[in-house]
Image (cartoon, rainbow, N blue to C red):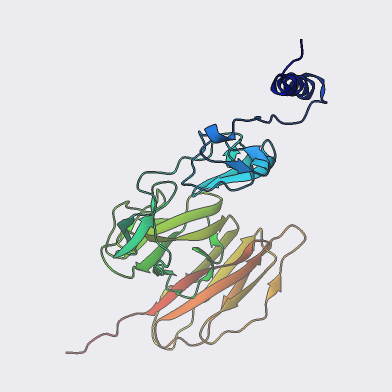
Amino acid sequence: MKRPPLYTLGILAICAAFIFVFISPAKSHSVEVGFTALSPNGISGGHIVPASCDATDPPTANATDYGGTCPASNSCGSGPGTYDACGSCQPNSPLPTVPTDYGTSCTTSICGQSVTGTYDCSNNCAVSDPPTCSAPQVCFDGDCSLSCVGDTCSTNPVILGTIHDIKWVCPSPPNTDVSTNFSSDTDTNGEDTDVEVLQPGTNQYTVECDQTQTQITIDVTAINPVMSLSATPSRVTSGGTSSLAWHASSVTSCQLTGPGISPPAVNADINGNIGPQTTSTGAITGQSTFTLSCQTSDGPVSTSVNVSLVPSEIEI
């Protein structure tokens, strides 16, 4: 019996489909055949875009990039990613979480000033152009020109166990010093006159200004040379003289200075010792200070002695 032409064409179509699906070489991707009408997002690069893809948010890449590497990122971080079937870059591992308040306005205090910023990825109030905070000014034994690097200042070495004076001025009150080395942990008058250097090596004294949230640290190096200077007598009548006796050890050289005397510096012996030596003063007509200045391997140190006048008798 002779078959209708349409029947023959149907058989051929079925055979062709069988060959295409089961015999043709495998592709690196799947292809829907005859069902494009069921994918509302259409075709991209020869591939049907799944209906699950968000048509209102255009993908970052063509669907043909599926499985390829890409840089994934959000407002708080980035990392390696992979293109999905929709052409969007999905991170291979979770990216940092973006806080709910990220980018919203906030207010914080810097240097005692109220400033406006925005919340960052750590949920802190970040200020793009913060004001500059002025550090406190400090003086050590009356020297207000200390050598400073950043928020740390250094003094000349001092003798271990000696007492010193530290003054400070904060940009705005109130101010508080915070250091276990100060004589008081809550001294707010801007001066500590009883700072005793007790530790060999570096002693640190930190002044913090509460209002401006700034601080500065003073490094004081304590060394332990032996220095002795005495005056006999320590009180003279006007025009009288005194004898200065001195010696030093653990030094490299020393020089005695004061009113009416200017002997040359004396070098220490191989063991770092000088003296004992005696030097006579000139005529003393007023209270006079004599200073023994010595050099050590750690820097200069000094000690002083005063000679005063005996009060004149008042005749009646």
Choose between 151 and 79: the one closer to the eye: 79
Q: Residue furthest front?
A: 1
Picture coordinates of residue 206, whole percent (x, y): 42, 57
For the point 35% across and 48% down, the residue is 101
Task: Look at the image and tell me whether residue 87 can be seen.
Answer: no
Q: Vertical placement of 250 versus 294: above or below?
A: above
Identify the residue at the far left of this view: 316
Is 39 left, or right, of 32 in this rendering? left
Image height of 281 relative to 43, above or below: below
Count of picture labels: 0
Residue 220 horizontal side relative to residue 19, left or right:
left
Q: Which residue is drawn at the image coordinates 29% and 85% (left, top)?
A: 312
Rendered location of residue 216, percent (x, y): 44, 62
Instruction: Judge whether residue 303 can be spotted in this image.
Output: yes
Residue 210 vs 8, above or below: the answer is: below
Which residue appears farthest toward the top when viewing the image? 1
Q: Quadrant of residue 314?
A: bottom left
**Residue 176 to residue 254: above or below:** above
Given residues 179 and 174, the one toward you in this image is 174
Q: Quadrant of residue 15?
A: top right
Quadrant assignment for the N terminus: top right
Q: Position of residue 119 (x, y in %)?
A: 38, 52
Compared across the picture, whether 236 is left or right of 12 comes to left
Q: Where residue 148 appears, x then y in whole percent?
A: 53, 68
Looking at the rendered image, the quarter that the C terminus falls into is bottom left
Choose between 1 and 284: the one closer to the eye: 1
| Residue positioned 61% across, 64% down in the render | 247
